[in-house]
Image (cartoon, rainbow, N blue to C red):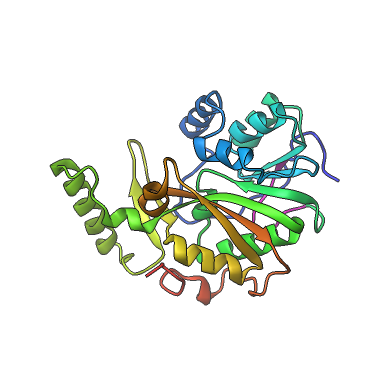
């Protein structure tokens, strides 16, 4: 059983140079996002019945509570977890639900506790090195009840090969992306370096086909992919939402910070 107050003693693990969600500006951005509620793909997942209304939901990597608040308002029994202390404190202040500071690679709850696990906003892709991603997938399988649903979003590596719209700025942006990653030795690995207006960060990306294969290796059966606006966005959108059913225990070994978890040893989706 988890406490309804924030547990500040659950320490997250290091994630290399992935985005730092403890920064004040990052927390402010996530608090602002909370007002917008669920993303379109998340609303579609709810409408299609992929969240069990009769069993608890684990909102993994909940940030400042954008999805937690929206799910609680819809009547779901939600437990929120995030590795960032400032983020989970914002969630705890915004919603009457159990809030835990913890790590997706060591989820502090009993086996089979949840009917649905949500890992939104590409949170799974932040885990580095790849062994931590594998550990998280094993943990998600463990805490899901039999036939439970795993709903998550992930970067789509196909997007890097589509210049859309076909403008000079898009072309130069794609050229810069590949030049930066070639200089960092990341081409051919599942991790890429991304930039936005205020930061540069490392994140995992793969193709939908390779992502479904990875899910099967960890005891899940993929049952749906959800894009922002139809088939083209499912194939080439920068982010794809996946829904998978737990079909049994993970068949892949959990790996920690060993040599086999280095970028380049995993499935980059090619």
Residue 105 visible in the current orientation: no
Residue 184: x and y in percent read 30, 62
> Which residue occupies the extreme right position in the image?
1
Question: Is 74 left or right of 110, judged from the image as shown?
Answer: left
In the image, the segment drawn in magenta is 100-108
Question: Is 176 left or right of 139, judged from the image as shown?
Answer: left
Residue 54: x and y in percent read 80, 41
Residue 29: x and y in percent read 48, 29
- Indicate the quadrant where residue 196 lies: top left
Residue 243 visible in the current orientation: yes
Please say whether residue 15 is one of the residues in the magenta stretch.
Answer: no
Q: State the residue at coordinates (57%, 50%).
A: 152
Quadrant (top left/top right/bottom left/bottom right) for the C terminus = bottom left
- Indicate the quadrant where residue 189 lies: bottom left
The front one of 85 and 36 is: 36
The front one of 97 and 228 is: 228
Above or below 213: residue 62 = above
Please say whether residue 101 is one of the residues in the magenta stretch.
Answer: yes
The front one of 76 and 66 is: 76
Q: State the residue at coordinates (22%, 58%).
A: 179
Q: How many marks?
A: 0
Residue 123: x and y in percent read 54, 48
Chief secondary structure of the magenta span? Answer: loop
């Amino acid at each position: 059983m988890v406490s309804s107050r924030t547990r500040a003693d659950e320490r997250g693990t290091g994630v290399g140079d992935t985005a730092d969600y403890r920064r004040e500006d990052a927390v402010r951005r996530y608090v602002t996002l909370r007002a917008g509620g669920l993303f379109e793909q998340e609303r579609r997942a709810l409408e299609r019945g992929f969240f069990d209304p009769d069993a608890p939901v684990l909102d993994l990597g909940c940030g400042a509570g954008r999805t937690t608040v929206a799910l609680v308002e819809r009547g779901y029994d939600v437990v929120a977890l995030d590795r960032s202390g400032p983020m989970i404190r914002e969630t705890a202040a915004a919603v009457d639900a159990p809030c835990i500071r913890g790590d997706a690679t060591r989820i502090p709850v009993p086996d089979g506790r949840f009917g649905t696990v949500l890992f939104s906003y590409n949170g799974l892709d932040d885990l580095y090195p790849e062994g931590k991603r594998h550990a998280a997938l094993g943990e998600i399988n463990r805490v899901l009840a039999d036939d439970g649903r795993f709903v998550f979003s992930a970067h789509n590596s196909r997007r890097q090969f589509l210049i859309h719209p076909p403008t000079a700025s898009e072309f130069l942006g794609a050229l810069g992306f590949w030049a930066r990653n070639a200089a960092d030795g990341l081409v051919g690995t599942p991790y890429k370096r991304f930039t936005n207006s205020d930061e540069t960060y490392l994140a995992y990306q793969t193709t939908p086909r390779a992502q479904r294969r990875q899910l099967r290796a960890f005891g899940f059966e993929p049952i749906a992919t959800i894009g922002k606006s139809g088939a083209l966005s499912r194939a080439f959108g920068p982010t794809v939402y996946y829904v998978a059913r737990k079909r049994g225990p993970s068949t892949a070994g959990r790996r920690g910070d060993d040599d086999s978890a280095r970028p380049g040893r995993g499935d980059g989706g090619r």
